[in-house]
Amino acid sequence: MSWPVIDTYEEVDGQLAVGGIPAQLLAERVGTTPFFAYDRAAVTRRVAAVRAALPDRIHLKYAVKANPMPALLQHLSGLVDGFDVASAGELRHALDTPMPAARMSFAGPGKTTAELAQAVAAGVLIELESENELARARGVAARLGVRARVALRVNPDFAVRGSGMRLGGGPQQFGIDAERVPGVLAGLTAAPELDFEGFHVFAGSQNLRAESICEAQRATVDLVLGLAQAAPVPVRYLNLGGGFGIPYARKDEPLDLGPIGENLHKLIEQQVRTRLPEAHVVIELGRYLVGEAGVYITRVVDRKESRGKTYLVVDGGMHHQLAASGNFGQTIRRNFPIAVASRPTAEDATDAPEKVTVVGCLCTPLDLLGDDVELPRAGIGDLIAVFQAGAYGLTASPTAFLGHPPPPEVLV
Amino acid sequence: MSWPVIDTYEEVDGQLAVGGIPAQLLAERVGTTPFFAYDRAAVTRRVAAVRAALPDRIHLKYAVKANPMPALLQHLSGLVDGFDVASAGELRHALDTPMPAARMSFAGPGKTTAELAQAVAAGVLIELESENELARARGVAARLGVRARVALRVNPDFAVRGSGMRLGGGPQQFGIDAERVPGVLAGLTAAPELDFEGFHVFAGSQNLRAESICEAQRATVDLVLGLAQAAPVPVRYLNLGGGFGIPYARKDEPLDLGPIGENLHKLIEQQVRTRLPEAHVVIELGRYLVGEAGVYITRVVDRKESRGKTYLVVDGGMHHQLAASGNFGQTIRRNFPIAVASRPTAEDATDAPEKVTVVGCLCTPLDLLGDDVELPRAGIGDLIAVFQAGAYGLTASPTAFLGHPPPPEVLV
């Protein structure tokens, strides 16, 4: 038996192991199924791999939105250089870690004035998404008597090819259009309440093509070098975003970090170092750091045949892992990697794979975790693992749907 | 100004009113935005309309999964004849109402043995989805020394044309294939732990075509009349499902209940009454009873222009109303009905509509509530209403996504 995501997980005692603990024992330790298990060592290894591939001068930031589990944040606070939060709720968990607030940023459209006040009070860098937000940040800073640390989020005039999601180029709710930024910068000299640090440009996410990411980084540096000429003070912060994707479907090839590292090295040495000597270059990653380190484990409750098809009905489902059901922003549903995690207990268990459809326990046909997948024969009581569950899993799912209890998350 | 769903909501003081309370006052009373407001009178009216259209003998059941808000369940317990639950969590809230447990059913694949025990202990009718579930229900009943009330959920050999979702026909995780039901019924005589009451057949949901629903009801009655011949006792329960849809997109025509009532009348008088004289005919509706009675209200936090497009950024979003963002099982995104709920406060407010894109506060391009919609000019502080939010709204959304607080729900 082998797991589809072989680099991350090992087999112990004929079972999938997370953090060295075989799945059945882990399920007993958790005390209930379904649950999410995140592999502490896998996160550590992934951060180390990114650091090894990227230039030393890169500031590596974790985008908390990918997975805000408090224990995971505590672990990551010792590994990365900063956190990016997308709400006051995420900020609260981030501030509970040893990570200094000075190394945190707050991005996202629709920040409320109350959220801006929390960010200013905490001393977090605010990535401003609009002129109005800038005006409100000034107002908050004046009221609190504290300068607000700000960067401008820029909506670039280009998009990234091959991104799973586009967040830049054309009209956008994100950031300030690049062509309006010089005007905004000019106004900053009359805004002593704001401490301007630099720029954030983020053009797309979940990209598996290194060359597209490199191209976006080059275009971003070009754009920022131009904008920086209108800045009232030297640029200290240059957030290039992230967008590093992970493979979800069988045909997906993992991202090659090598060319990205070389590209960043060149950009820093040939352009940033000379023209923006005070700038910290930031790469902000969420999914890429934690996505593969998480697995969703659920137990088979029923095994049934219906008109030639075999169904495994599990005690989990789309209410915990919406993306795996294909109902979270996907236009075409593709199976996430899936495996039998326990040593199969079916009386006639063999290693000969069979075609089964794995469905969740919800009373809706949307609740599909694996459609016509090949698995070793599994029966009631066996554990099924859905991989790539470390990012945008539990928090991106409708946990209250149909009234089942929320699943535990464990970091092992 | 007029609301797109004019039958349900009225205008008071130039604003959208829910339960007679204008939106701005309601937002003050709730104390925060965003929130869900359900109109008590609208639910009452809708149940009355269904009762008026359907034959007196129909037992009208509410499918709790559509909206399990406790206060709403309390209200509905005085209006409908029964509740259907899809989990032990829903069962708990249902049992907190005055509705007798004897008039509740529990359906859904993947019921755990613990859930079956709760249902048997409560005296709820279990709609069995598989042979294995039947065996486990027997085991539970034997252990508790209480007979388990059961019905068989049948996977029919037909599908319903025009359903938003198909739950019957072909291979399914739902129910027992029709052709296997006679064998299962034969086995019931040797299962004294089970009190067999009848059948549940549910072929599809969210259907706006009355003729398709009538056709499914006729085919269901035909199917059950055949199956009933193999039943060990007279059939007392005949759950025809529901599937009544509500309009979401501009082009959708509301469902015409007239033909459905006539069809049911004929089926009951000409077939059920004579051939299954002890059978209660059940129609089970969720979305149809509550969907139009709910509205999601969110406040404009930012108004921005980007390359020729105007964006209203609101303090809510897809984390509360996933279906309205087009990311919950839809293949093509269509705008839900949307309106400015408050009296617009923008200085240059006029009644001349403008084209705007309404986006949520999440840092993802998926968070889209209204794409290029025509609205009266609205500014920061104004309230936006997204309609058809009474069913599969809050509980079908990833509320924890990006760490914002959960929105209140109020019944007014």
Image (cartoon, coloured by chain):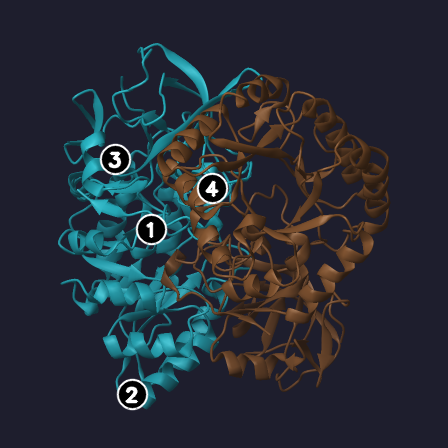
Chain colours: A cyan, B brown
Q: Which mark is residue A66?
A: 1
Q: Which residue is mark 3?
A: A258
Subunit of label 2 = A
Q: Which residue is mark 2?
A: A144
Subunit of label 4 = A
Where residue A402 appears, x then y in whole percent? 48, 49
- Quadrant assignment, res B368: bottom right
SS for tag 1? helix
- Label 4 or label 2, whichever comes before in sequence order: 2
Where residue B302 appears, x then y in whole percent? 51, 73
Relative to A2, residue A17 above or below:
below
Where residue B117 appears, x then y in whole percent? 40, 40
How many marks on residues?
Answer: 4
Query: How far apart are the two marked residues, 4 and 2, measured between alpha carbons?
Result: 43 Å
- Quadrant assignment, res A26: top left
Question: Which amino acid, by three-letter code, is at mark 2?
Answer: Leu
Query: How far apart are the two marked residues, 2 and 1, measured between alpha carbons?
Result: 31 Å
Give whichever of A50, A288 is nearer the camera: A288
- Same chain, labels 2 and 1: yes
Q: Which residue is mark 4?
A: A161
